[in-house]
Image (cartoon, helix red, strand yellow):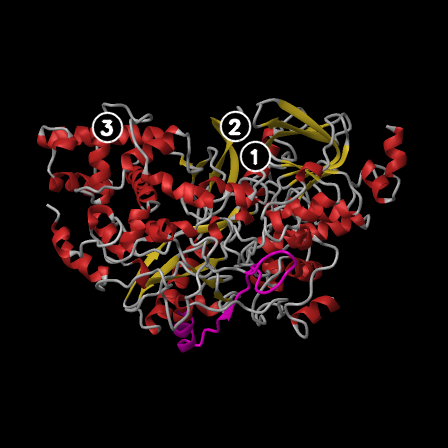
Amino acid sequence: MNDESAELPRQRRGITPQMVGRFPDFDVLDTVDQWDPVTREAVMSRLSIQGPLQFFSPDEEPALRALCDTLSHQHEEPRVPLAEMIDRKYAQGKLDGYRYDDMPDDRDTWHLVLQGVDEVARRRFGRPFHQLDVESREGICQDFSDGLLQGGAWDALNVKRAFSVVMRGVASQFYSHPWAWNEIGFGGPAYPRGFARFGEMSARESFEAPEAFTADPVRDVEARHE
Amino acid sequence: MIRHWLAGHLLKGAVGPPDNDSRFLLHPHRRGIQGLDRMARHGRDDEVDLCIVGAGAGGSVLAQRLARRGLRIVILEAGPFWDPDRDWASDESAQHKLYWTSPRVIGGRNPVELGKNNSGHGVGGSMIHYAGYTPRLHPSDFEVRSRDGVAQDWPLSYWDLKRHYEQVELELPVSGQNWPWGDPHTYPFPPHPVSAAALAAWRGALKLNIPMRAGPVGIVNGSFGNRPHCIYRGFCLEGCKVNAKASPLVTHLPDAIAHGAEVRAGSMACRVELDAQGMARGVEYVDVESGEHRFQRAAAVAVCGYSIETPRLLLNSAEARFPHGLCNNEDQVGRFIMVQGAPQVAARFPREMRMYKAPPPEVSSEHFYETDPGRGFARGFAIQTVSPMPIAWAEHVMAEGYWGRDLRQYMRDYNHWTVLGVLNELLPHPDNRVTLDEERDQFGLPVAHMSYGLSDNDSANIDFAKGVLRDIWKEADAEDTLTIDRYAHLVGGCRMGFSPEDSVVDADHRSWAVPNLYIADGSVFVTQGSANPALTIMALASRLASRIAGGSALPVRSRATALTRTLRGERTAATGAR
């Protein structure tokens, strides 16, 4: 189901989502002692975030988890706890500062989307979304991304814009997590130490590690979709 | 100005601005403004000389200038009073609080997403999270109707603003190479070092004979009072924890407060109120913490809430004499709002670029700024480097339709990418406007609805610019590119003009309808050029302040206001008489 785990290097230092990545010897948390206290608190609190969910109801939880897993391609532990992170954002009443005039509030969009993916899953496979295999869930998400879902909850939404609300929520939480920074080799907060090496001669600080391989995703992704 | 000439030539990096001590008032080791417990606090029944709504680029400069002239000033700011040490993390997600995230509704043919990237919240305004680019407008920007037959001319010229541009560039201070475009000029600080990511773009541009320059950025490069040198951590858009990047919080408010201005944070303005004679008598606001409604009396009011909140405040201030919103009897409030086209093209290179290091704003070009009839559209665009952090980069990848496994795979390649963007001059259109929506915010006030649509000229400009970016990357030997369509910046919405029929305020920022009501923010822009607006907003506020202080921009209908008395040095007597 997750063919990548076999292809990608195992993480040797620190944690990445699913323990794979491209920088097996890089752990951004090695520098945590050099961050200012406010930054340290903001980043480290993401490592201890836990349920129970407050904004989403227990009925919505299975669909939420399955949707987050599918959209972020997280099918094994360790996972970035997206459901908990998104839940916390809305429980704290945080919004993004705009709403399309043909869309409900982002919070209602989430409720409708979770209802909608279950409706589609039952219609197509006779089972709720979270009981589907990964391939079937990805098929529904592809139609969601392409704006092709209809009926029930979807009729209250502009489907493509709803996908953007949900995907923006997933990605902005996923890439705020230090495990994801390890996966992509991002140097992290760097305050107050700053970065010294950004010229032509050297792109890596002393604490940053080289990548294990290089591959252009553009061609890979195209090839996989053909 | 001789000082500016010396700063840009013989004494680069060594000349500070006159009449602004902010850089010395900041603490060398603490980032927040010190001594706030000693800041002036005006009583509720106290009539101040000037009540400013919004502590951003416009309001802060106006306050700093006029506080120095002895005016008693209160700035109402809806958001918090930031202390970067205490409130800010060096982190993309945690800094979401810098944006105006109260509800707003968007629509039209090409809706513009708000919040992150174009709307600030808190003392310092949007300049807290702007990238740091500080280009001037070109002289041509003020006369596009006369030159190109599109949009509208400004009621003032570049030359009216020039000395204020120079003063503000000293105050920020701006670093950059000598500037060959528009009105050629120099900068007071030398350019920052250029990262490998930006050099790749420069190399491609050179092959196409497109000149690039380092800067101009309002980021300290050297020694500037108690503000430290940039540490190149790359988090310019997340608020500068270093105090190296210019924002009113470090460039103007320390001096304003030292000269008696009061910044009242957590105060959301709800309406400007008029007296029986039709003059503004003050501003009603909500104390955000207690929810209590309060009133600040003032001899004059300056609205500086930017292109969405300024029109919204006027529209929410409707009353019998102005049933469709204050100053809106000619149906001009909220119209001609503009954004800049800001498509970005990312490029992949075989070697690591690690674009998150160094300030995102590094090198730029105004080679395509002016109209070229051969391109088939009026006006042009500027090219600038931008370096998204991981979350912003994920948005780039998602814009191409990738999610799930594809997204993860693209993101793992983050360190190989670098990004160039443009700013297209989009033209003003009356139907691009802010109105009130049915939805209400937490204070019960109707929220803004912003409608936007592109014209054919706008689309042609954007398409041409994306082609140029792709050509540059091709010449730079990039392996692949990714394109994202987006917008940046807000200006217009209460534009200045020649008559009440075509605008909301006159060339001195006075509203046509209410003589002691000024608007001093980006909403007065008539056109926008391809320049990031912050420097021009500050320069306009600086010019307005000098015209108020000089007596030429006072409320026309009544010259004997408290404002005039203060400026004449009669405040003590006047206060005594009250």
Please provide percent x and percent y for residue B47.
Answer: 77, 30
Helix, strand or loop for disc 1? helix
Q: Quadrant of residue B136?
A: bottom right
Q: Is residue B445 left or right of residue A90?
A: right
**Circle 2/circle 1 CB separation < 8 Å:** yes
**Circle 2/circle 3 CB separation < 8 Å:** no
Stretch of the chain drawn in magenta: B201-229
User: Which residue: 23% across, 59% down?
Assistant: A217
For the residue carrying disc 1, how many other residues have a C-alpha within 10 Å: few (<14), some (14-19), or many (20+)? many
Q: Is residue B213 magenta?
A: yes
Residue located beneath label 3 in the image: A61
Residue located beneath label 2 in the image: B446
Mark 1 belongs to which amino acid? Arg
Residue nearer the viewer, B73 or B278: B73
Labels 2, 3: front one: 3
Mark 2 belongs to which amino acid? Pro
